[in-house]
Amino acid sequence: MLLPLPFPTALDYLAPEGAVSPGDLVQVPLGKRQETGCVWDRESDVPADFAPVPAREVARTRLKPISGKLDMPALPGDLRRFIAWLAAYTLTPPGLVLAMAIRARHTKPPRVVHGWVRGTEATEGLRMTEARQRVMAALGPHPATTASLAERAGVSDAVIRGLAAAGALREEVVTCDPLFGTPDPDFDRPRLSPEQGEAAHELSSAVREGGFATILLEGVTGSGKTEVYFEAVAQCLAQGRQCLVLLPEIALSTQWTDRFARRFGVQPALWHSELGGRKKRETWYAIAAGRAQVVVGARSALFLPFPALGLVIVDEEHESAFKQEEGVTYHGRDMAIVRARLAGIPVILVSATPSLETLTNVEAGRYRHVVLHGRHGAATLPRVALIDMRKAPPERGQFLSPALLGAMRETLARQDQAMLFLNRRGYAPLTLCRSCGHRMECPNCSAWLVEHRARQILTCHHCGHHEPLPHSCPSCAAEASLVPIGPGIERVHEEVRHHFPEARILVMASDTLGSPSATAEAVRQIAAREVDLIVGTQIVAKGWHFPDLTLVGVVDADLGLGGGDLRAAERTVQLLHQVGGRAGRAEKPGQVLLQSYLGDHPVMQALVSNDYQAFMAQEAAQRKPGFWPPYGRLAALIVSADTAEAADGLAGRIGARAPDLPGIQVLGPAPAPLAILRGRHRRRLLLRTRRNVAVQPILRNWLEGLKLTTHERVDIDIDPISF
Ligand code: ADP
Ligand code: ZN
């Protein structure tokens, strides 16, 4: 029995012979309380090479009996194996992973309500009392519950029961949930280009043949990747199996779900963290019952109890948003592949800019590769040009260069739309005292406070701390000496308003839009041409399709390159490529302008020449010699305590017992990327090994017997994405 608690193994309980089967959810006593558990067997515990399954030995006489079986669908075997695998791989107690799979456990199944409609038996032979006649007259086209029908007809329940027994009434489910309609694989098939058709055929064949395979679908933005993988979805549906599509930011995917509905006739089932309790429960049960056939979700959808999963798709597979950094740390893309392997089904990774991990696996022959070369139809790729900010800088205190402003003016004159991108919320990332040089910092984190002028506050983007904007410097007390340094999206908006007072401007940032419905409304306004200029953060980089958008300006193309993270260059190319890909997606050609002080940087060169492959070859050459991922493996230990001394002490203790094995290196301890976060002082140790070494046993040995006080913590991050 596996309980959703941090125990190292499953526990044993007694159950009458044949009363429960593996995967069943049951109620069991634990101390004085009752807990939900999942019947676990040897098969559920498929040991990964890197994790021996600990032996469980319990004296039979001390076993307690289970309390009873829950009225819930059992967890399928492939899901149980996935839970065990993920737990072993991430060094997490398996119960905590199980907890992610049975989130709906404290809730009853959604109530199925029945109602009455006219039955098949004729009423002629029946003795029709006046009361009975009133019931028949009160029936409508939709099923009515006993209570409502009795009230409408002014009769007792017994009259209705009598008519039902005679066959004059028939029972039907009242709420036939429109959310989980049946997608029709042939609802509106597109006419694919020959290249698209070939790609679609290859994907569909993999689904038809079944069995595990990983396929990379690569194609420039606007090449029709979505249309193409929809064909694989159609094939999966035609075979009566379920399909899971993972998107990095599902709450923002209204354009995607609308497209799905146009193609398949119904909306897909949605799964993400913002789903309300009732919706979540209904969706969980609909999936377990096989009623929800296509689920589009965030990474947590990997833990849903699909009884007949036939295909997994990971769209924008290169996105770091797939990595879960809190609690159980795992990478949604990597775990999607594991899920597919354990279920014996294909998985399709989709991207215009695949990760180096994925490209390396393609090269090694582990993944298949399907490529779309050009944009669909008349659309061409946007022209990308650099604005060298050293040569023609903006006016003092401003952030838009004359060249970018000129291009915006031309675009608006043509009645096209333009978009400015800056990956930074708020007004200014730093507030500085002109008089003493004091910087406004977060009291809980090693980070600057970001000014949000509209809300008149300084706030920390890491812990949420906020305070009013002070009138005088807290350090030297000088009056009116605090000045904003650098641009955030609000400040760029201010500048744009100043230069284009007539234009209709829309700001798109996660904090200004807030809800998915607000985002949907913003997207509608852009598509309906109610907006001329869009100023936005990351949110504008998503897969939006705006036919009249022809200019994309990147305010600070260098922004992601600081900080010494080995993956920074790769991430910046991917993000800016994605942002630029919003331009010129229909007949009108698009243009992308990058403002940069680092014109010679390989990232800028890769974007201008649109040679992603050459850039990635360079990246590979840089990472290979040091055995950095994907050429080696990495695990991070984040050590934290409530004072700097305690954190150093603990990190030192752990560092002192670091493994000393050939082919293995321990880097650090060093301050973690955020040395102080929410008041906790953090240090990091990195374990680096060759690719063929499993890091889990090494970490287990390393940390075995380590005693921690209540103030000390060690978090393990296998395959960290920042390094
Ligand atoms: P990607 O996912 O590669 O960015 P999309 O699938 O979003 O590309 O396609 C870009 C645009 O081109 C979309 O509006 C899509 O509907 C359209 N499109 C692509 N292929 C076809 C096709 N075969 N027939 C009609 N429209 C297509
Ligand atoms: Zn903070």
Image (tube, rainbow, N blue to C red):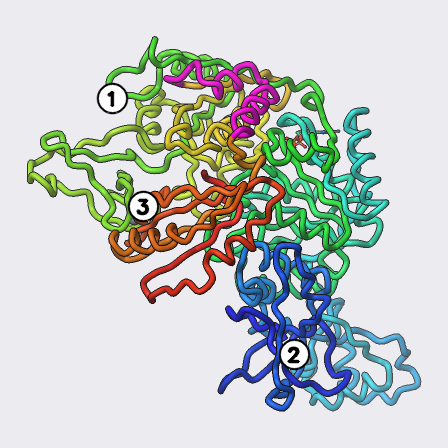
Point out which mark residue 397 bears.
1
Ligand number 1: quarter of image: top right
Count neighbours of disc 3 (C-alpha within 10 A) and say few if under 14, some if 14 to 19, many if 20 or more. some
| Crowding near the residue tagged with mark 1, few <14, some 14–19, many ≥20 C-alpha atoms within 10 Å | few
Task: State the residue at coordinates (59%, 31%).
Answer: 545
Q: Nearer the viewer, residue 174 or 718?
A: 718
User: For the residue labelled by badge 2, is the local secondary structure a helix, a strand or a loop?
Assistant: loop
Q: Which of 655 and 263 is in front in this view?
A: 655
Residue holding disc 2: 70
* Residue in the picture at 32% in, 37% down: 426
Amino acid marked by disc 3: Ala
Tell me whether the residue at label 1 lies in contact with that at label 3, contact meaning CB atoms closer than 8 angstroms.
no
- Position of 634 with respect to 409 (left or right) is right
List x then y, in percent, for residue 513: 43, 43
The answer to whether residue 520 is seen in the rendering is: no
Snapshot quadrant of residue 84: bottom right
Task: Look at the picture and state if 703 lies above or below 374.
Answer: below
Vertical position of residue 366 compared to residue 386: above or below = below
Q: Tell me the magenta residue range.
A: 596-625
Q: Residue 560 in magenta?
A: no
In the image, what residue type sits under mark 2? Answer: Leu
Residue at point 83%, 86% (across, down): 165
Tag 3 residue: 675
